[in-house]
Amino acid sequence: MQASEKARPEGRDDIARAGRSTRANLPVDWEIAGGLTDYRTALARMEARAEAIARGEARELVWLVEHPPLYTAGTSARAGDLLAPDRFPVYETGRGGQYTYHGPGQRVVYTMLDLKTRGRDVRLFVSTLEQWIIDTLARFNVTAERREDRVGVWVRRPELGPGREDKIAAIGIRLKRWVSFHGLAINVEPDLEHFTGIVPCGVTQHGVTSLVDLGLPVTMADLDVALRETFTPLFGPDAPSGETRSPLS
């Protein structure tokens, strides 16, 4: 599905206004999986839920998980960017982007949201996801930024050298009948050495970091609270009954 030709929103307020759903009486479900979630199981659940949302049979869902160590290949992945093919399982996905790593200590946020009610603008949706990450990290006094020439969220690392920037969060989505799945990943305390088995997102000139690598003793629970608090201003309310534990956890 192609991105809309609409102009990129100019500021956070533009993004917030455009990202909210017109489904005012259908808040977004919010689930946190315990333990490590099998990747194939996660894919199957996302696809089933996205289909149900498209049919009008289920509410939108934000699903927070951690995975065991693995690599995923997006639709733009280049074979040469998989540097250690035998290190961890490698999964082909239908999401956008290139190679990325998932593993313990990284919060993966799967966003099953209905873009039919959110303007049908793919680029705006990606910008809103970026803004959600930026607002969340600001809760921990991290100045995170987007870049026009590369998807994801980045932090400046001048202490490591002039012009150094490290990626702290990745984004990759897929749409089916205008419902998104896959989503984003924020590095809390993963083993950063695991990223050396790939060229993350095809970017060779910058590094990868995490909240703990930046010297911040942030826990996964801390991040989850911040994610939920910053979600509503951009996307609208989540379910009033509060979080549920995933049956797949």
Image: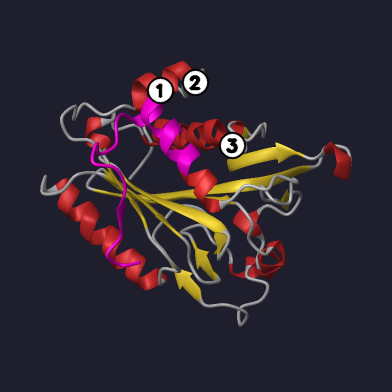
Magenta residues (range)? 225-249
Q: Residues within 10 Å of mark 2 (few under 14, many from 20)?
A: some
Residue identifier under label 2:
12
- Secondary structure under the numbered disc 1 in the rendered image: helix
Residue at left offset 66%, top offset 31%: 141
- Secondary structure under the numbered disc 3 in the rendered image: helix
- Residue 212 x %, y %: 69, 51
Residue identifier under label 1:
16
- Secondary structure under the numbered disc 2 in the rendered image: helix
Q: Residues within 10 Å of mark 3 (few under 14, many from 20)?
A: many
In the displayed structure, does residue 57 sit left or right of residue 72?
left
Q: Are marks 3 and 2 in contact (CB under 8 Å)?
A: no
In the rendered structure, which disc, 3 or 2, sits on the residue that comes first in sequence? 2
Q: Is residue 148 visible?
A: no
**Amino acid type of the residue tagged 2 in the rendering:** Arg
- Residue 4 x %, y %: 36, 32
Q: Residues within 10 Å of mark 1 (few under 14, many from 20)?
A: some
Q: Are marks 2 and 1 in contact (CB under 8 Å)?
A: yes
In the rendered image, the quadrant that contains the N terminus is top left
Residue identifier under label 3:
137
Residue at left offset 23%, top offset 41%: 241
Residue at left offset 58%, top offset 60%: 105
**Amino acid type of the residue tagged 3 in the rendering:** Leu
Depth check, mark 1 against mark 3: the one in front is 3
Q: Is residue 92 above or below residue 18?
A: below
